[in-house]
Image: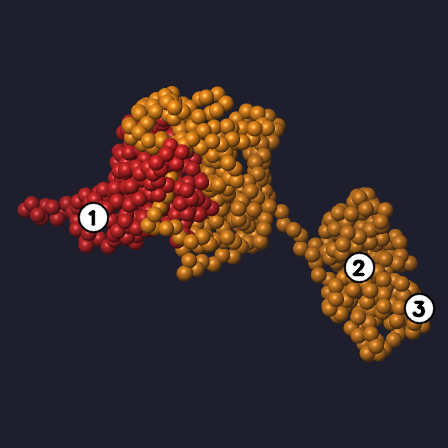
Chain colours: A orange, B red
Amino acid sequence: MGAILFLGAFLICCLVRDASSDAQAALLPEIARACSPRVEVHGDRVVVFDASGLGRVIGTPEEIGREVQALAAGQGLTVRVALAPTRAGAWLLAHAHPGVTVVDAAQMKKQIGALSLDSLRSLGTGLVDSRRSLGTGPVDSRRALEGEIETLRRWGLKTLGQVAALPRSGVHTRLGWAGVRLHQAALGEDADPLVPAGIAPAFLERMQLEWPIEGLEPLAFVLSRQLEALSISLERADRGAIAITTSLRLVTRTTHERTLTLPAPMRDARTLRTLILLDLESHPPPAGIDAVTVSVEVAPGRITQGSLLERAYPAAEHLTTLMARLRALAGESRVNAPAVLDTHDARDVGMQPFAVTPACPVARPAVSAPDAAAPCVALRRFRLPIAARVMVERGSPVRVMPATSAIPAGRVIDRAGPWRSSGRWWTAGRANWDRDEWDVELSGGGCYRLVRDRANGNWAIEGEID
Amino acid sequence: MASSALNRLETLLAARKLDGTLARPDAARMPGPLAPTGIASLDETLQGGWRRGDVSEVIGGPSSGRTGVVAATLAAATARGELVALVDTFDRLDPATLAGAGVNLAHVLWVRGPAISLPGRPPMVADTLHRAIRAFDLILRAGGFGVIVLDAVGAPARAFQDLAPATWLRLAHGLSNQPVVGLLVGDRPIGRSARGITVRLTSTRRWVGDSPQSRRLASLDIRAECEQAQRSVQTKPAWTLRAAV
């Protein structure tokens, strides 16, 4: 057969992966993208791409087909390749014939016409979107397609050529738009244009340094450049970073990697740089830095709208930066919102996340407003209880001598107690407790929570009533 | 001559925005919006509540009711839907107490300092206090909070003397013209702003119960003295902090 020339016409290539090469399924779209930027992906077995223009690079369509097949074989994939003027023609021929099939317009109609009705089943994998015509889901689409094929079979038709010979208006009358699409496929006509799939952009910036840097100050300049570029990319894609990973390749040939999870999508370069630097202040790299890589995981940009009726709350970027700065100052686990724990052990302290985002703005609490006429006495807890020597008469403390000068020793003017509590007797160490608590007023001034550990008889001041 | 020189001096101070220390009548300055304290008697004394944009103080001796006043202020603020922050210099906060006072804990940013035993080693206490002030400043600059409290109860006097003289002036300047209430809580006057209020508390404990088994602390009866730069000291009738049941 002589070389086939496609003059001024489209050349569509369809690749169908054989089931034997399932392990390399993810490579199929990459192979297509290596050949053309206009790629349509149909699951993990079929891709269609526009091969028009490859003639200048590779040569005739046969050479293109052989090159594509060789490219796939080099990646461990066994594929069927078909090149035709239309997508529907390439699709049907690739599913019907193994190896490389190259046809022009006339040959396409002839070869498609020779195919059996069963070839139409390959259209159910996505080429014919019956949902648009029937308004049903994918499973219903396949059932509808089977029904239509069965109807054509009952009419006595055996090949696609016989289907193509039917009058279109009659097919439309009897089978509707779904039948029209099958009729078009039998003629090798495209019902829809090829819609290229977008390539998921990777938001990553990498910089190889000419000489190693040490310290965060020079690193800040490097990060500024990278994050400015990332910020522009994110803005163009209308995306925000929800996690940012900083990989520092060190002179010791190791990698120091830190990942920050952000409470809300953000793309402000200065905020991201501040967060990275604050994190690296707490977790500095142990050696000089050779290369810096910053990558982000993205989410769609969020739209926020303020209200004239509600109080303004801090922006997520400001709050995240504030929390990072406070944690760098006070410690990772020392900054959050307090929480009341479900325990009888008064020593336990709970914290919960402090986050105010546009998704959960500050709302008026459901509880009623506190009683302004009768507020409550509060307890100030000493996390490190203050040891004390206590003189006891008739089972009650009468004099307290703390081990610190911050609380003056004194006689007990009045007292309440003991309240006895215990718990977690089945655990060892500090987790269990068995104690008596007293509220005492001392002659030196002040009311305190006095505690006696029944296990060892030691006294301690655990809090001030204020 | 003297009055013209005084006028020139006041004009010069106003031009450099240092006129906050001048003892002008209140009518010369529009009062900022007020944040109710949550205690009716104290609100009456303060003519509505804490003044936003100023640093005020709550001071007093042991068991004088300072923490109760702070808890009531935070409860009132969170009930209004505001975010509040508490810089707990020596990690003294009891979350159950705040919850019992009606504070919405999810809207409280709690910055916990190290739990050191006071009076402690001076360098450590000084560093802790310095970090607490730094945290207060960071929260203030971030904005979005209705009340910011710095709890420095128990800090020795020497720790405050070691601070830079302009520390409190800087904080007051940063707070001015912002819809935020700054509260300092301590044993003695710390550094309220020129237009802030110092509330000095004293208390009497009321015990009830005749038998040792039924004896308990029922309430703290609080008396307050309010000091302000442009006003004389006022003492109002007391209010009561009832003990939690």
**On the rendered structure, is B65 left or right of B245?**
left
Measured in 3D between alpha carbons, the distance from the residue under mark 2 to the one under mark 1, in whole angstroms, is 79 Å
**Relative to the observer, which residue lies in front, B188 or A278?**
B188
Dot 1 falls on a residue whose secondary structure is helix
Measured in 3D between alpha carbons, the distance from the residue under mark 2 to the one under mark 3, in whole angstroms, is 21 Å
Q: Are marks 2 and 1 on the same chain?
A: no
Dividing the picture into quadrants, the one containing residue A129 is bottom right
Which residue was labeled with disc 2?
A125
Dividing the picture into quadrants, the one containing residue A294 is top right
Q: Quadrant where the C terminus of chain B lies? A: top left
Q: Amino acid at mark 1?
A: Ala
Mark 1 Cα shell of 10 Å, populated few (<14), some (14-19), many (≥20): few
Q: Chain of mark 1?
A: B
Q: Are marks 1 and 3 on the same chain?
A: no
Q: Which mark is residue A450?
A: none
On screen, residue B77 above or below B192? below
Q: Amino acid at mark 3?
A: Lys
Measured in 3D between alpha carbons, the distance from the residue under mark 1 to the one under mark 3, in whole angstroms, is 98 Å
Q: Chain of mark 3?
A: A
**On the rendered structure, is A277 left or right of B222?**
right
Q: Amino acid at mark 2?
A: Thr
* Residue B4, position as x, y percentages in the image: 9, 48
Asked if marks 1 and 3 touch (Cβ < 8 Å), the reply is no
Q: Which mark is residue A158?
A: 3
